[in-house]
Image (cartoon, rainbow, N blue to C red):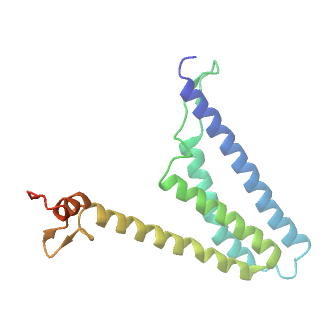
Amino acid sequence: MAQKATKVLAARNGNSLNRTHLISLVIHAFYLLLRLLFFYKSFTLRSLLLYVSFAGPSFVIEFWLERIGRPVYTSDGGVQKAGEDLEQKGLTEYLWDVLYWTWACVALATIFGDRSWWAYTAVPLYSAYLAWKTYSGMKGGLGMGSGEENGQPSESKRQKKMEKRGQKVQYR
């Protein structure tokens, strides 16, 4: 049972990537098939360019996730490299969010047409929200936010309670 965690991570990554590629294949094939067979009059060069430009990020993200997460096995079946954890927080989590939203936009464009690509504007808005949240958290963590007023450190709850009881509080 040597390297059990590595084997579990490799299996989880392999299953996750295989499932991702299958879902992506089904969604994109469904889009192209329906657009070419049933909505062929509205499937113009403009529609194709919209599809390529908005679905393109999902292909790039899938390629990147495949590159960093696909496990590498030895010739005897052992795990040589498990790949990075595809369930980690941060950038990987954001990439999954963009991938899922791109699939949703492709499905919407399949059913409702090219105007549905406007839903993809949620991605930059979400990115701006995450950037602001990160900046605000970092600002508060560095003591730049609301913790100091007029250059004087604010009192903690414990210090306020002690002063209320009449005990002397020593500041450093």
Q: Is residue 120 left or right of residue 152?
A: right
Q: Is residue 30 left or right of residue 137?
A: right
Residue 80: tell me if it is visible: no
Quarter that holds the N terminus: top right
- Tell me how many marks there are: 0
Residue that extends furthest to the front in the rendered view of this protein? 165
Can you tell which quarter of the image residue 35 is in? bottom right
Residue 111: tell me if it is visible: yes
Foreground of the two, 90 or 21: 90
Foreground of the two, 11 or 157: 157
Percent coordinates x, y for residue 145 in the rendering: 27, 70
Foreground of the two, 169 or 6: 169
- For image coordinates 23% across by 61% down, the residue present is 161
- For image coordinates 87% across by 82% down, the residue present is 41
Percent coordinates x, y for residue 14 in the rendering: 65, 38
Foreground of the two, 150 or 59: 150
Q: Is residue 3 above or below residue 150?
A: above
Percent coordinates x, y for residue 21 in the rendering: 71, 50
